[in-house]
């Protein structure tokens, strides 16, 4: 399912501790079979979607002394738990919605993710 979205957003570079999420369909059914339209679900505080891309993680401050003769030093990062393909449950109010090629995506900070569901264990 997630593979069909990867081709169109392959050139996106997600920055820092953010993730790019393809939101799941908001229409759901109640236990009695009643269909709840997306407008009802929009008022909820949490949302779910599949992670398409992740940023490099949390940047670590450079503690080395700046010396011009050394040249530029590479930024180091603390990695994140989220990986592409995970189903993420996240706080909706911290997400930023964008549209690309008539598809909606959300940019979400890693700290706003409450739960990750992964089909395969991390190897």
Image: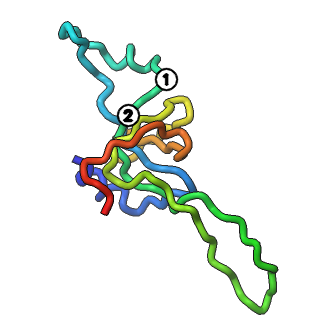
State the residue at coordinates (45%, 53%): 81
In the picture shown, does residue 42 fall above or below 87?
A: above
Circle 1 residue: 45
State the residue at coordinates (57%, 62%): 78
What is the x, y in percent for residue 45?
49, 23
Q: Is residue 3 left or right of residue 111?
A: left
What is the x, y in percent for residue 92?
49, 30
Q: Are marks 1 and 2 in contact (CB under 8 Å)?
A: no
Write down the quadrant of residue 49 in the picture. Answer: top left
Q: Quadrant of the C terminus?
A: bottom left
Q: Is residue 85 left or right of residue 43?
A: left
Q: Residue furthest bottom?
A: 69
Sort mark 2 into few (<14), some (14-19) or many (20+) by Cα contacts within 10 Å. Answer: many
State the residue at coordinates (52%, 50%): 18
What is the x, y in percent for residue 35?
24, 12
Sort mark 1 into few (<14), some (14-19) or many (20+) by Cα contacts within 10 Å. Answer: few
What is the x, y in percent for residue 33?
18, 10
Q: Is residue 59 left or right of residue 87?
A: right
In the picture shown, does residue 118 fall above or below 94?
A: below
State the residue at coordinates (29%, 58%): 7
Write down the quadrant of residue 62 in the picture. Answer: bottom right
Write down the quadrant of residue 31 in the picture. Answer: top left
- Check residue 101 in the rendering and tell me which mark sits there, or answer none: none
Q: Residue furthest left?
A: 33
Disc 1/disc 2 C-alpha distance (Å) = 11 Å
Q: Nearer the viewer, residue 12 or 72?
A: 72
- Check residue 48 in the rendering and tell me which mark sits there, or answer none: 2
């Amino acid at each position: 399912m997630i593979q069909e979205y990867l081709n169109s957003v392959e050139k996106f570079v997600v920055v820092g501790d953010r993730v790019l999420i393809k939101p799941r369909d908001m229409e759901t059914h109640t236990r009695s079979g009643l269909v709840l339209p997306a407008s009802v679900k929009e008022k909820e505080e949490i949302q779910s979607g599949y992670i398409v891309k992740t940023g490099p993680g949390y940047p670590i401050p450079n503690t080395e002394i700046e010396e011009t003769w050394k040249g530029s030093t590479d930024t180091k990062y603390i990695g994140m738990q989220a990986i592409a393909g995970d189903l993420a449950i996240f706080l909706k109010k911290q997400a930023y919605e964008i549209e690309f090629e008539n598809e909606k995506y959300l940019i979400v900070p890693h700290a706003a993710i409450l739960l990750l569901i992964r089909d395969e264990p991390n190897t």
